[in-house]
Image (spheres, coloured by chain):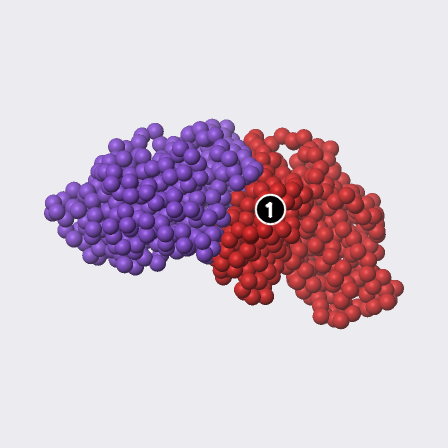
Chain colours: A red, B purple
Amino acid sequence: MSAAKTAPAVSPLAPTHVPEMPEIAGVRLATAAAGIRYEGRTDVLLALMDKGTTVAGVFTTSKCASAPVEWCRGILKRGQAQALVVNSGNANAFTGKTGRSSTALTARIAAKAVGCTTSDIFLASTGVIGEPLDATKFDGVLGTLAETAGPGGWMDAARAIMTTDTFPKVATATVKLGKAKVTINGMAKGAGMIAPDMATMLSFVFTDAPIAAPALQALLKAGVGHTFNAVTIDGDTSTSDTLLAFATGAAAAHGAPKITKANDIRLKAFVKAFNAVLADLAEQVARDGEGARKLVEILVEGATSDKSARKIAMSIANSPLVKTAIAGEDANWGRVVMAVGKAGEPADRDKLSIAFNGIRVASKGARDPSYDETEVSNAMKNPKIQIKVSLGLGKGRDRVLTCDLTKEYIAINGDYRS
Amino acid sequence: MSAAKTAPAVSPLAPTHVPEMPEIAGVRLATAAAGIRYEGRTDVLLALMDKGTTVAGVFTTSKCASAPVEWCRGILKRGQAQALVVNSGNANAFTGKTGRSSTALTARIAAKAVGCTTSDIFLASTGVIGEPLDATKFDGVLGTLAETAGPGGWMDAARAIMTTDTFPKVATATVKLGKAKVTINGMAKGAGMIAPDMATMLSFVFTDAPIAAPALQALLKAGVGHTFNAVTIDGDTSTSDTLLAFATGAAAAHGAPKITKANDIRLKAFVKAFNAVLADLAEQVARDGEGARKLVEILVEGATSDKSARKIAMSIANSPLVKTAIAGEDANWGRVVMAVGKAGEPADRDKLSIAFNGIRVASKGARDPSYDETEVSNAMKNPKIQIKVSLGLGKGRDRVLTCDLTKEYIAINGDYRS
């Protein structure tokens, strides 16, 4: 359908520091150019995990999920993984029966290459939707990758899963589990697709900590609430969003305790580090939002509940009028009031206060008497904008990340596909 | 805050035919430049209605409604009206106590000018929010308007309530009620504000039919469901949205029957005409959406219920990815699938069919075999785009109007306010 576009410049919000990615015992990586969509571009990642690796996953809430998402959901309950195959260029979404055959064939090719059963193979695809994915392209490629896979190459892996992300997204943490050091590595791709059809979020997190699948699933589910689920670019939901966590358990060999319950007190430091990796990756997704020039943090406090605060924060974060105002460096608190009002959650106009980057612009139902337009205008030039809304009703609070809505977003998404 | 911008060019989607607006017995209009925000621009409308006029209203669902909306809600239950005062330039929204004083003062000035009680005075304001509205500016002005008001001047009235609408919006119908001819006139302003803070929708409908207030309220409430409530520009909800209907009853003098119940069988033709006026005005609002270059009609059929169809249609209509694709004249059905999927309503990917302007592009969970990209691309050049989604699950259906999302929307809403 579409010709390759010139690569976009790196987002001005890209992190200035990229961490050195350590190895994770029990994980080996390899990438290749399989020609899924574009010639001469790395588009397949194979991650091999040692036998005994546990897995957890969360997926898109879309009612029209892609074939790979259905595949992963189907095998997740076993809680075991030996390989992850990710391709970019084609999402294998809305491809009907062909899509299901394609995932099954990919899994068979991978299982043969790795030497395991198909239900140990996790799949993720990102790219154009509605186009049949020719899984025979993986034949041969996955065999070679399985042979050459090694413990390094994390940045290459993060690059292989990109579509039109403007930078690879990685995060890492090391932390004590019992007396043993364990490592957590993560990668993500986000919202920066031009030619294809939507902004799919894929993320994969790996650790050598020995954590049973049900416990890992509980950690992941709890962890996404304030990280990946608290990020929005345009309110649109991909049919392919996938976040998988793999725990090889290799750290047990040097003394890490085997964890079977998510509420195990020995997990405390691990959970903190795990959530920090998720939060780091999620923030990088917002920083690479399509056309983004501003990273926007929405803080809501004083709501009647945390859930109510989340709805209000999302209403603000997804409001085109709020997002365009920020693109225009305009501290347009009137639009924030509008977005609070439309959320449908308890709010009392006359108790509402709003601050931009710490400067209170509105309080108790009217413009703040101390409002200094020049001071606020200068603050709005900052590449990071914090909007804090105090509802004055209760103790509910939440935090959501988003980006501004610029002409570049329209250019990226409104370009002719063909 | 903001300097006046140069007037935008008329929307390319503006109706080519503007109706002659007849007089309505019992209604007199007058407009003036009160200098609410800009000098030398008509910004106040006074509509005088004969004693005995009934009124109905529907308002924004925002939890942070403006002071004039609160005022109208407060007096609506009496069901009587003698005047409507509308100003553009200042929405009197999020102005706290000052806002309430301002509406009360405006009503007092109007009541004195008209010679009625304040609870017969309906108010609507549109424009910048958070700025105190100096109601003393109405002093003198409303007195003069009350003296000069006449039965004509409907186009002037429609112009006086505009903010940055690119064309005045009027509609009219004449219909038999019993054996008498009755007339329905309506005007609206929509989503085309630059300097202020949101796209407020105001609409006022007048008739000489003798309809009791509770019946008129029931008609209006039923009428908005498939007209004004089925239009979305960007999913944002103004704090000031107001739709009022006034029935002077003057047609009773030449034989129109007095109607007290909305289900009166004699109302059949009237209801049809009334709804057609609402639908016409609502479509004009979509045609004047900020930066709009395409009028987009979303048809959803085969849903499990009409309510479910509405949610799916709105999910499509408010999707930035769908709207930017249409701006790019791209029949990107993948994004439509995405929007169906994220609506959270029952949908079976493998039963889904999608057509653009009558050309089926996807069916039964995959690209339609007969899909001809050139044919579809040509169809997408049409200024009116119809997206039809068939879910194949039940008999639920709905229709929603919207417009595309263009760089002009960003320019309009992302311009520096100060």
| Quadrant location, the C terminus of chain B | top right
B347 lies left or right of B416: left
Which residue does the numbered mark 1 point to in the structure image? Answer: A372
x, y percent for residue B244: 32, 49
A409 lies left or right of A147: left
Quadrant in the picture for residue A164: top right
x, y percent for residue A345: 50, 59
A406 lies left or right of B114: right
B172 lies left or right of A166: left
Neighbourhood count class around disc 1 (C-alpha, 10 Å): few under 14, some 14–19, many 20 upward = few
x, y percent for residue A12: 70, 39
Point 24% across, 47% down: residue = B49
Point 82% across, 58% down: residue = A174
- Is residue A220 positioned above or below B191 on the image? below
- Is residue B77 positioned above or below B357 on the image? below
x, y percent for residue A31: 77, 42
Q: Is residue B227 visible?
A: no
Q: Is residue A210 visible?
A: yes
Q: Chain of mark 1?
A: A
Total numbered circles = 1
